[in-house]
Each structure stands twice: as structure tokens, then as C-alpha cells.
């Protein structure tokens, strides 16, 4: 799978495989940026983390907690964020994906946590967050057998919905942030300015300015917003009142459990697992220009760490965490993916947990600036999700799974009040666009799998238009399986070239039979015919042999067929020849 | 399969379109060899519009390349991309031919000799 090539940077990630860094990365996972780049990149990610600090603040507000308790929740959460970000990069034993995968408060937990805060206060939020993290951790142990039920397009959907929700939160700040009324002009100016700085630096500059476009945009937007008189006066005043250094306090911590909340929090755990699976997949692809399939070991370690991070956060008295698609957006936009940055982020965030004054500065980021930044980041998350979805062949069933789920999530985003009219049993599933979309996609995927045959056969008439028959057969099956298009192309070539060689050289009697079976990891194709055995030599015939020998073209065909598949074998049983091609998927 | 034959700056160009398989390879090989035998010393084969090439197609290309060599001519390929490029890789005959990314570059290299 991984080949070393001329040019580019060859890195060796912690799973031991040699990989070639993608050309548009300034610093790959194994590279060590200079200290200035390292610390500024870390600060930029801390800026992104600051954006999602709005989630625990919203949850604290829903539980009726005081500002002091909200600050304690934040400090506890930052300790968990710092530890999780370091653990993700470290990759030790079963822990850590091995990538720069910044962790933070996650939108997938927002809906269930708000419902729990209203139903049972903060103890229920913390207790159910522990449960949710354990669900995700348990899933990580059985990720491989679950993969057919959680295909890549579902991971892509979760990322896409995260992008939609991120953008929607940003837009909501501007459209309904002031008692349901659109924000006044200074808010739009600050949001537009923040977004314009980020976009301008990202598109039309290079080097440091491009790398730190999000951080520069945040700082510039913050300064303009303060100058325009935006921001919460109480929050800005609190900055001055906070002490510079203080130990995090945990006297708010208590846990409770409610069986009625298990479904939405279990769904949040599944969504977090899909989110992290998708994010780690993006990191793998980003750091390896020759990436072809997800490395499930790295995904499993990342998902286990992600679940444990959420449980740790709940245990410390804070809210649900997961790897941040927003940070993935920043990494893609800036091309800085060095693992060392994770350690710097972890160090900064843990130190900030002891510095209430700086935390207060982050918390006081004016809503309009947060809105501009969220919209910028959402662009990259949305496209990342689309790319994962379209990396597979999609038939009408899979298109409907994605389309209906996105439509349902949009309905929840657009008409959140309509949830109150739903039956009480369904309300926990309809409180969050992400949960609604994920659950619906999971259910539809299971339903639509019915009737999709994993083993299919074709009888091929050598005198007919067999190239078209082979292409149509594999293309249609590939779409219903959700297979990778490159694997299906290889299967089409293999069977077409084989049929051609058999007709030319092996005097087949009667039709050829093709049996293909597929699961998420394997495509196996057996071609049977009555006739002479076609050999699949390991060594290539010479140019002269191909040109002049009677069997030169046949031997070249056998050689190409062997190299086209990951494994190829020819055998004769009871007078019938069977050629077996195996393709890793 | 359709085969377009033309002239560009003193270089003969051959552009097959469709599939080069056991059915069409002979026609394709015969056209290129006939061109060389008729005196064409510089030949560019543009494979940009080929969707599939089998072992029979590679054999036709090797025969044409040998004939060009024997008549002290030049034969080069261009437009080898995507699936066709992968097939060149698995045939392990990629280095048997001079291959250039674009037709313009290929013509310029063949002209330069």
C-alpha cells in the first residue's frame, strides 16, 4: 500500500508504515516545525478550542449554573482537553491515533447535554457524558466487525452534518442572537471582517500569514469588535476580576444516571466515534499522498482515546469531548499537521486551566467574531465530509440514505421548536440535528442493506459483447456495495483481460461464469470455464518473447493479471479451470 | 475503435480512440507499422482517448517500436494517464517506451531527435 517515491518527504508514523507526505502539507505528522511555527500553530488551535467553549457555557446556562460554576466546568474540561490532545498524538499501546488530532467540546454532545441539563441538572450531564464515552470506547474495540454497518459514507455524513451545524451556529449568532432578532450592523461588520481576514490570508498569502490565518483573523476580529463596543460587558468586566493563577476547583462535581437519556447519549457516543473515525481517516489521507484505505488500528486507538477523553471529562465535571472537525479544517487550510503541535496545545490548555484570567479572555470572545470564525471553519469541514462520502461508489440506496438524513438534519436546524410536537419518546433523538441525521442514516443504511446481495454471479457468452457486460456488472454491483471505484476498475480490467486471453488462447467451451463476493475488506472474484489452463507467471516475458513467441501475449496477459490483483491463483478442478482474484478493500 | 492519423510539424501522429484489445490490436498495430514502412521517421502515438489496453495492445506497441528502431526512426507515446497509466505499470513495459505527458512536448522531443 505504501511506496517510497522520488521527491517529497517520506515519513514513518507510529504504526510503522512508510508514507509519502501529501504535497500541500507544509509540515507532516513526523516533521518538527521551528519553535515559532510550533507555538503559533498551537495558539491557533487553542483559538479554535476557544470557539467551542460556547458549548459548555450553553449547557451550564441551561442547568441554571452560576458564572463561577461555568468557569469551573471550563477549567475541568480544559484539563481533559489537554490530556486527550496529547494522548491522541502520543500513540502508546492501545491509546492514541498518532496524529495531531486536537480534542475539544463537541457539537455532537450539545443536544443530549442540553436535554440532560434541563431534566436533571449538571450531575446528569456529567454522568451521562461518562456513559457516552464508555459507549464510544466499547465501539472502538469492535470497530472492525461493525464497519459494514458504519460504512465510510456514514462517517462522511457525520462530518458533513458537523459542518452544517457549525455553520448554523455561526449564522444563528448573527440572525437570532439578540432575542430572536437579527444582529445589529456592528455585529455584521465584525463577523464579516473576521471572515474576510481569514479568507483573504488563506487564499492570497503564503507562509506564516496563510498558516495562521485563523488566529490572525480571530485576534483582528476581537480587537475590532471591542473597538466597536461589542462583547458582553459582564464577561469583559469579569476578566479584570479573575485572579491570574488558581487551582481548578471540583466542588461542583456530582454524577447521576437516567435510563431515559441512554439513547441520545449512546447515539452521541456513536456519532463521536464516527466523527473521530472520519477525522483520523482524513489525517491518514492528508499525511500520505499514496493513501488508499483507512488504517483501522490507528482509527481504533483514536476512537478508544476519544471515548476515554469524554468519560474523563464527565468524571472531572465537564462536558462531552471529541476530536474537532473544526481543527481538521484548520490543519487542511494551513498545511501544518506536525504531531509536536499536539504536545504544545496540550501544554497550553492545561496551563490555561490554572489561569482563570486568560480563560475569561477566551470566553469573552464577542459572538460576532465567533460567528465569522465558525463559518470559515465550517467550509473545510463540509468539504471534508463530502470528500469522504464521494470516495465510495453510490447507488440510489446510498444516495437516499445520505439525502434523506441531511434533509432531516436541516429540518431540525430550521425548525427546532417543532420538536416539542413530537412524541416524548422521540424527542431525545430530535433535539440535535447531528443526532437526528446520524440515527436516521444508521437506520436507513440497515434497512436498505436488505436485498443487497454480497455474492453475485454472471454467465458470460464469449461470443457476445463481454467487455460491456463485465463493466455493467461490476459497476452496478460496486455501487450497491459502496465499493471503492479504484478496486472496481481493477476487477473490471482483470475479468476483461482474462476473458480476452481465455478466448484467444484457451479454447473455452460454453459460457464463462463469474462469481463475485464483497465485504468491507475483501473483493473476491472467481472466473470459471471449460478449457485450457491459463498460467499466471510471476516473471514478465521479455520484449522479444512478447513480440515474436507464439505464447508471448498470453504469458504477458497472465503476468498482468497476477499483478493487477492483490492475490491471483489459477487451478483446475474436475476439468474446469477456476481463476481466483482477490482484492484488498 | 477509431484511429486518427495526422501530421504535425513534420511528425506523424496516431490517435487511437476506444479500446485496444485482442479484437482491435491487429488493426491498430497494422496502421502504425504501415505508417512507418511508408517512410514516417518520427511517430507520436497519443493514448489520451484510450479507455483500455490489454496484453494484445502492448504487443502491438512493442512490434511498432521495434520496427521504428529497425528503420532508424523515432516512436514516442503521450497521453498515458489514469487507468491506462496503471496498466503500463502492471505490464512493467513503461520503460520500454519514451513517454511524455503532453502531445506538444512529445512532438518537440521527437523532432529534436
Image (cartoon, rainbow, N blue to C red):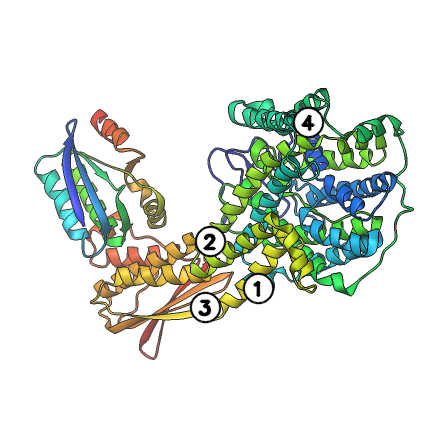
Kindly report the distance in space between the C-alpha atoms of the residues bearing marks 4 and 2.
37 Å
Q: Which mark is residue A443?
A: 1
Residue A83 drawn at (x, y percent): 77, 43
Q: Which mark is residue A520?
A: none
Residue position marked by numbered label 4 in the rendering:
A40
Secondary structure beneath disc 2?
loop
- The reply to whether label 2 and label 1 mark residues of one chain is yes
Q: Which mark is residue A392?
A: 2
Mark 2 or mark 1, whichever is nearer to me: 1
Kindly report the distance in space between the C-alpha atoms of the residues bearing marks 3 and 4.
50 Å
- Cβ atoms under marks 3 and 4 closer than 8 Å: no
Kindly report the distance in space between the C-alpha atoms of the residues bearing marks 4 and 1.
43 Å
Q: Is residue A514 visible?
A: yes
Q: Nearer the viewer, residue B12 or A3?
A: B12
In the rendered image, the vertical position of residue A224 relative to residue A563, given as above or below: above
How many other residues sit within 10 Å of disc 4, few (<14), some (14-19) or many (≥20)? some
How many other residues sit within 10 Å of disc 3, few (<14), some (14-19) or many (≥20)? few
Q: Earlier in the sequence, mark 2 or mark 3?
A: 2
In the rendered image, the vertical position of residue A292 relative to residue A471, given as above or below: above
Amino acid at each position: 500500500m505504501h511506496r517510497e517515491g522520488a521527491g517529497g518527504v517520506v515519513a514513518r508514523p507510529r504504526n510503522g508504515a512508510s508514507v509519502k507526505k501529501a504535497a500541500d502539507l507544509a509540515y507532516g505528522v513526523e516533521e518538527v516545525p521551528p519553535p515559532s511555527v510550533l507555538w503559533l500553530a498551537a495558539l491557533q488551535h487553542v483559538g479554535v478550542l476557544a470557539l467551542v467553549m460556547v458549548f459548555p457555557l450553553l449547557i451550564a446556562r441551561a442547568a441554571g449554573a452560576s458564572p463561577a460554576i461555568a468557569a469551573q466546568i471550563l477549567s475541568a474540561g480544559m484539563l481533559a482537553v489537554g490530556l486527550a490532545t496529547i494522548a491522541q498524538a502520543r500513540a502508546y499501546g492501545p491509546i492514541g491515533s498518532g496524529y495531531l488530532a486536537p480534542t475539544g467540546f463537541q457539537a455532537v454532545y450539545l443536544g443530549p447535554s442540553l436535554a440532560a441539563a434541563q431534566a436533571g441538572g449538571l450531575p446528569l450531564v456529567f454522568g451521562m457524558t461518562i456513559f457516552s464515552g464508555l459507549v464510544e470506547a466499547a465501539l472502538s474495540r469492535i470497530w472492525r466487525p461493525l464497519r459494514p454497518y458504519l460504512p465510510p459514507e456514514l462517517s462522511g455524513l457525520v462530518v458533513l452534518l458537523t459542518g452544517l451545524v457549525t455553520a448554523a451556529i455561526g449564522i444563528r449568532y448573527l440572525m437570532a442572537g439578540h432575542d430572536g432578532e437579527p444582529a445589529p450592523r456592528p455585529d455584521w461588520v465584525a463577523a464579516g471582517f473576521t471572515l474576510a481576514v481569514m479568507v483573504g490570508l488563506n487564499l492570497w498569502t503564503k507562509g506564516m500569514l496563510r498558516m495562521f490565518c485563523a488566529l490572525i483573523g480571530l485576534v483582528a476580529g476581537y480587537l475590532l469588535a471591542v473597538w466597536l463596543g461589542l462583547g458582553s460587558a459582564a464577561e469583559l468586566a469579569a476578566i479584570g476580576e479573575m485572579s491570574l493563577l488558581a487551582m481548578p476547583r471540583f466542588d461542583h462535581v456530582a454524577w447521576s444516571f437516567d435510563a431515559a437519556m441512554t439513547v441520545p447519549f449512546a447515539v452521541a457516543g456513536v456519532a463521536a466515534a464516527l466523527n473521530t473515525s472520519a477525522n483520523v481517516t482524513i489525517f491518514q489521507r492528508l499525511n500520505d499522498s499514496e493513501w488508499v484505505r483507512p488504517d483501522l488500528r490507528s482509527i481504533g486507538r483514536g476512537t478508544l482515546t476519544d471515548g476515554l477523553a469524554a468519560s474523563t471529562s464527565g468524571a472531572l465535571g465537564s462536558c462531552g469531548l471529541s476530536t474537532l472537525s473544526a481543527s481538521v479544517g484548520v490543519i487542511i487550510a494551513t498545511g501544518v499537521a506536525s504531531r509536536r503541535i499536539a504536545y504544545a496545545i496540550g501544554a497550553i490548555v492545561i496551563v490555561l486551566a490554572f489561569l482563570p484570567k486568560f480563560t475569561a479572555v477566551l470566553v469573552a470572545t464577542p459572538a460576532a467574531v465567533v460567528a465569522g470564525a465558525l463559518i470559515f471553519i465550517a467550509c473545510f469541514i463540509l468539504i471534508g465530509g463530502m470528500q469522504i462520502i464521494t470516495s465510495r461508489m453510490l447507488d440510489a440506496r446510498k444516495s437516499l440514505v445520505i439525502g434523506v438524513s441531511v434533509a432531516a438534519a436541516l429540518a431540525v436546524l430550521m425548525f427546532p421548536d417543532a420538536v416539542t410536537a413530537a412524541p416524548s419518546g422521540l424527542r431525545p433523538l430530535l433535539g440535535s440535528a447531528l443526532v437526528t441525521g446520524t440515527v436516521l442514516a444508521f437506520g436507513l443504511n440497515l434497512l436498505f442493506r436488505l436485498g443487497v446481495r454480497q455474492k453475485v454471479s454472471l454467465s458470460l457468452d464469449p461470443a457476445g459483447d463481454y467487455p460491456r457486460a463485465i463493466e455493467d456488472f461490476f459497476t452496478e454491483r460496486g455501487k450497491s456495495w459502496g465499493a471503492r471505484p479504484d478496486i472496481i476498475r481493477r476487477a473490471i480490467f482483470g475479468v476483461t483481460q482474462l476473458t480476452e486471453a481465455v478466448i484467444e488462447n484457451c479454447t473455452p467451451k460454453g459460457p464463462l461464469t463469474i462469481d463475485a463476493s464483497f465485504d468491507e475488506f475483501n473483493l473476491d472474484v472467481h472466473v470459471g470455464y471449460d478449457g485450457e489452463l491459463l498460467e499466471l507467471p510471476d516473471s514478465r516475458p521479455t520484449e522479444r518473447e512478447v513480440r515474436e513467441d507464439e505464447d508471448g501475449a498470453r504469458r504477458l496477459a497472465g503476468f498482468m493479471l497476477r499483478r493487477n490483483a492483490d492475490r491471483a491463483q489459477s487451478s483446475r478442478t474436475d476439468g474446469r479451470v477456476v481463476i481466483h482474484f482477490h482484492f484488498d478493500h | 475503435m477509431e484511429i486518427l492519423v495526422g501530421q504535425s510539424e513534420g511528425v506523424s501522429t496516431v490517435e487511437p480512440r476506444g479500446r485496444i484489445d485482442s479484437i482491435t490490436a491487429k488493426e491498430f498495430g497494422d496502421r502504425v507499422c504501415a505508417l512507418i514502412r511508408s517512410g514516417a521517421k518520427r511517430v507520436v502515438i497519443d493514448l489520451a482517448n484510450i479507455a483500455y489496453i490489454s496484453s494484445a495492445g502492448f504487443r502491438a506497441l512493442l512490434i511498432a517500436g521495434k520496427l521504428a528502431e529497425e528503420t532508424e526512426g523515432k516512436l514516442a507515446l503521450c497521453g498515458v494517464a489514469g487507468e491506462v497509466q496503471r496498466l503500463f505499470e502492471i505490464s512493467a513495459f513503461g520503460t520500454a517506451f519514451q513517454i511524455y505527458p503532453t502531445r506538444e512536448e512529445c512532438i518537440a522531443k521527437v523532432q529534436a531527435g
